[in-house]
Amino acid sequence: MIAPFVEEVLKVAGVVVVLRIFGVGTPIRGFVVGYLVGAAFECYENFLYIASPDDPYGSVAEAFAALPVRILLGFGLHAAATAMTGAAVAYTLGQSGRVLGRVSIGVLLLAIGIHLVWDLATVAGIAGYALMALDYAVLVALFLVTRKRALAASKRMSGGRPS
């Protein structure tokens, strides 16, 4: 179960690259960039898992059985987690000029934890679906809170209008 650690760090690296190229801006910019980076990663990962010639699911039938879980149940997992991390990174960059800080590291660890629980739930049988639902509910709640806080912080940082 190394994927959550590697994937979340790689996605946040993508956010940092985009923020550095186009200017840090505000936490809401980091939120949007993070969402887009995460969504792109999710599309790419789903394509690899479903269309892989190595057939990670063992058979065509198993690959099609995984399709609803990967696309319907897990829709937005990477995008939402990376949006939260992107907002935290942009906030930290805006406050200190550094990528790493208490807020960005804390939110990155939270995203890793959410991803880890999701991955563990996929191997937990029927009980795993309940764990996935709980994990997804936590993710959505945190996503909405992060969006609200990113907007508020962005307004403060830009004199009343988010950018």
Image (cartoon, helix red, strand yellow):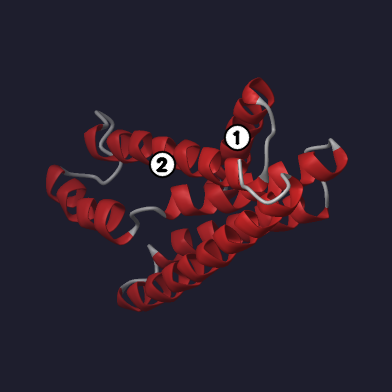
Q: CA distance from mark 1 to mark 2?
A: 12 Å
Residue under label 2: 39
Residue at left 20%, top 46%? 63
In the rendered image, the residue lying farthest to the left is: 61
- For residue 154, side relative to residue 8 (left or right): right
Q: Quadrant of residue 74?
A: bottom left
Classify 10 Å Cα crowding around label 1: few (below 14), some (14-19), many (20 and above). many
Residue kind at label 1, given as amino acid type: Val
Residue under label 1: 15
Vertical relation: 141 (above or below) 96: below
Vertical relation: 10 (above or below) 63: above
- For residue 31, side relative to residue 23 (left or right): left
Query: x and y percent of residue 5 in the render?
Result: 61, 47
Viewer-nearest residue: 32 or 1: 32
Query: x and y percent of residue 98 in the render?
Result: 83, 37
Which quarter of the rendering shows the C terminus? top right
Residue kind at label 2, given as amino acid type: Ala
Query: x and y percent of residue 115 in the render?
Result: 52, 57
Instruction: Specify whether residue 44 is in view.
Output: yes
Q: Quadrant of residue 97?
A: top right
Which labelled disc corresponds to residue 32?
A: none
Q: Secondary structure at mark 2?
A: helix
Vertical relation: 129 (above or below) 50: below
Residue at left 77%, top 55%? 103
Instruction: Specify whether residue 100 is in view.
Output: no
Query: x and y percent of residue 113 in the render?
Result: 60, 61
In the rendered image, the residue lying farthest to the right is: 96
Residue at left 54%, top 47%? 82
Viewer-nearest residue: 113 or 104: 104
Q: Earlier in the sequence, mark 1 or mark 2?
A: 1
- For residue 146, side relative to residue 89 (left or right): left
Q: Secondary structure at mark 1?
A: helix
